Image (cartoon, helix red, strand yellow):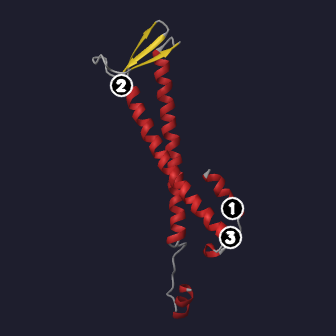
Amino acid sequence: MVSLVGLVMLCISYQPDEKTCMQFAAKLMYFLLSTMGLITCVLAVAFAAHHYLQITQFTCDTILNTCQCKLDTSDPLSRTFIYQDVSDCTSVTSAFNLYLLLQMVLNLIAAIVCLVVCFVMWKHRYQVFYVGTRLYSLTSTEIQQQKV
């Protein structure tokens, strides 16, 4: 959704100081969607990390064609995860570990992209980007022209 709004922003002709209502609405929507994307991606990383830690602590046993995994084998009330039609428990747990690690990395990359988008939008609106260094002092007329 964020990328579609970004493409719409590219199609709108740029007006300085956001003089068009459409441009302002697109920028606001882009910023809000990027912020929501950032929050969602961070939460997805946290939940995937939590599940990854749980899966690494599983104790699994193969019984017939099922794989039964428990978090705590000493606790009789511990939650049991049953995977049916599995010949080897290590293939299931290693596949889940790989899947969760991949999910964490991809969501972390998406969160960083959303953070950079929010940062650039915030900097563009409320602060000035300095492109280079000035090697000479300003005269009074140049200072007045910059304030305008």
Callout 2 touching callout 3 (CB < 8 Å): no
SS assignment at label 1: helix
For badge 1, the amino acid type reads Leu
The residue labelled by disc 1 is 10
**Residue at left 62%, top 50%?**
1
Comes first in the chain, label 2 or label 1? 1
Query: Which mark identifies residue 38?
Result: none
Find the residue positioned furthest to the top: 64
Residue 89, image x and y in percent? 46, 16
Looking at this view, is 21 or 48 the one in front? 21
Looking at this view, is 61 or 105 the one in front? 61
Task: Classify residue 93 as left or right of residue 142.
Answer: left
Q: In the rendered image of this protein, does residue 91 appear above or below residue 13?
A: above
Badge 2 density bin: few <14, some 14–19, many ≥20, Cα 10 Å: few
Comes first in the chain, label 2 or label 3? 3
| Residue 46: quadrant of the picture | top left
For badge 2, the amino acid type reads Gln
* Cα–Cα gap, marks 2 and 3: 55 Å
Query: Which quarter of the rendering shows the C terminus?
Result: bottom right
SS assignment at label 2: loop
Q: In the rendered image of this protein, does residue 94 appear above or below residue 38?
A: above
The residue labelled by disc 2 is 57
The residue labelled by disc 3 is 14
